[in-house]
Amino acid sequence: MAGQFFNPNLDMTRADVAWEGEMEWRNAQAGDLTTLISWVDDSRQCLLWAGSKVRFPLHAPRLADEIEFTPANGWCLCEHGKLLGFGQILQRGPSRAHFARLIVAPDRRGQGYGAVLCSKMLETARQWPDCEIATLNVFRSNLAAQSLYTSQGFYPVDLIQSVQRDPNVLLMVRTLHNEEKSGRCRVVDLLRNARR
């Protein structure tokens, strides 16, 4: 899958984006972090994108450590060699892929690239053997991101109170296969079984 070209008109979830040329979906490289850093202007943006464990201002070597970056868990959406989007897929148990730190280039936001990025991440996670669900965290105040994730089939899950979580952060989840057939109850069961 890495490095393959795809035609977004064939697999995108929003039809309101005018595409020219082909897009590339590839594993991220350490050098991509420098570009990402230029997309995050202040501490609030940093918090919304990466959570409380990442310190602002961002510095590439420290950022790589803070987000546990590896080329195997980082993915990039590119067009004509230009980085347009980034996200991480982290394995959390044998049946759960956790999506983290999704971000789209500032000049491409609001144009459907987030939907394509999320769609490609779902497609990638579906290729993992035994992976049944995808999860992600989003700040409750980040309504645009919540709307995007909902459009991609994610929905919020309330966890039992014994789980230590930031009350400002919402956990969202979806199955990777046959969402309609399995339903929310099945997703909650899978999430319980997939938790570390």
Image (tube, helix red, strand yellow):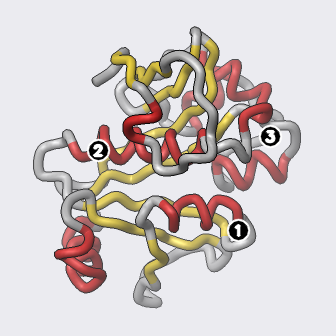
Type of the residue with mark 3? Phe
Residue extending furthest toward the left: 130
Which residue is found at the position 48% from the left and 36% from the top?
Answer: 68
Residue extending furthest toward the bottom: 161
Real-space Cα separation, disc 2 to disc 3, in angstroms: 30 Å
Type of the residue with mark 1? Leu
What element does badge 2 sit on? helix
Residue at label 2?
Answer: 125
Residue at label 1?
Answer: 143
Residue at label 3?
Answer: 56
Type of the residue with mark 2? Ala
What element does badge 3 sit on? loop
Image x and y of residue 79, in percent: 57, 17
Q: Nearer the viewer, residue 8 or 119?
A: 8
Comes first in the chain, label 2 or label 1: 2
For residue 73, the mark is none
Q: Nearer the viewer, residue 171 or 175?
A: 175
Which residue is found at the position 55% from the left and 31% from the top?
Answer: 65
Quadrant position of the N terminus in the picture: top left
Residue 116 sits above or below residue 61 on the image: below
